[in-house]
Image (spheres, rainbow, N blue to C red):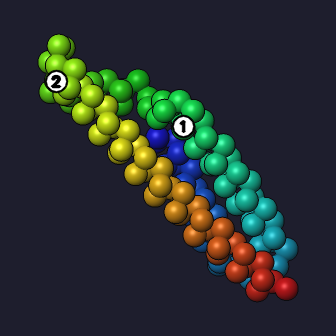
Amino acid sequence: MKEMQKKMQAMQEQMKQIQATKNPEERKKLMHQHMQSMNDGMMMMNKMDQNQGGMMSTGESQQKSMAMDCKADDSQCQAMQSMQNRQNMMQKRMQMMQMMMQQMMEHQAAEEAQQ
């Protein structure tokens, strides 16, 4: 998940550069780079979905394991923890998708302003 968050920050920086530039050729180049970054981000999100949130680093998964208060034989507690973890991952994914959609709209507005 941290890798995806870094990717999202990079895309936000790219959008700031696009909005700041006055040079049409530079803007076109930056927009192309941003579209590639968004495509890479979508591919990464698809992998996350396929792995059911498997993008956690070993350290993160160990922290989550230690944070669980469930006893080894308490399957109901473990099921609740699992559902909560999936819900948290889904919420983060939805936030990322919303940001990417916003950037796509800004992308389109920048292209229309160029014409």
Q: Please identify the residue farthest to the front as the structure is shown.
A: 76
Task: Judge whether 70 appears above or below 100 on screen.
Answer: above
Whichever of labels 2 and 1 marks the residue nearer the N terminus, that label is 1
Q: Which residue is mark 1?
A: 48
* Residue 18 percent across, percent down from the top left: 68, 72
Q: Could you say which disc has been placed on residue 70 in the image?
A: 2
* Three-letter amino acid code of the residue under disc 1: Met
Residue at 70% over, 60% down:
34
Callout 2: helix, strand or loop?
loop
- Packing grade of label 2 (10 A; few <14, some 14-19, many >=20) is some
In this orientation, which residue lies closer to the viewer: 75 or 36? 75
Task: Judge whether 44 appears above or below 73 on screen.
Answer: below
In this orientation, which residue lies closer to the viewer: 31 or 66? 66
Quadrant (top left/top right/bottom left/bottom right) for the C terminus? bottom right
Gap between marks 2 and 1, in whole Å?
26 Å
On the question of residue 23 being in view, the answer is: no
Q: Please identify the residue farthest to the top as the structure is shown.
A: 73
Task: Judge whether 5 appears above or below 72 on screen.
Answer: below
* Three-letter amino acid code of the residue under disc 2: Cys
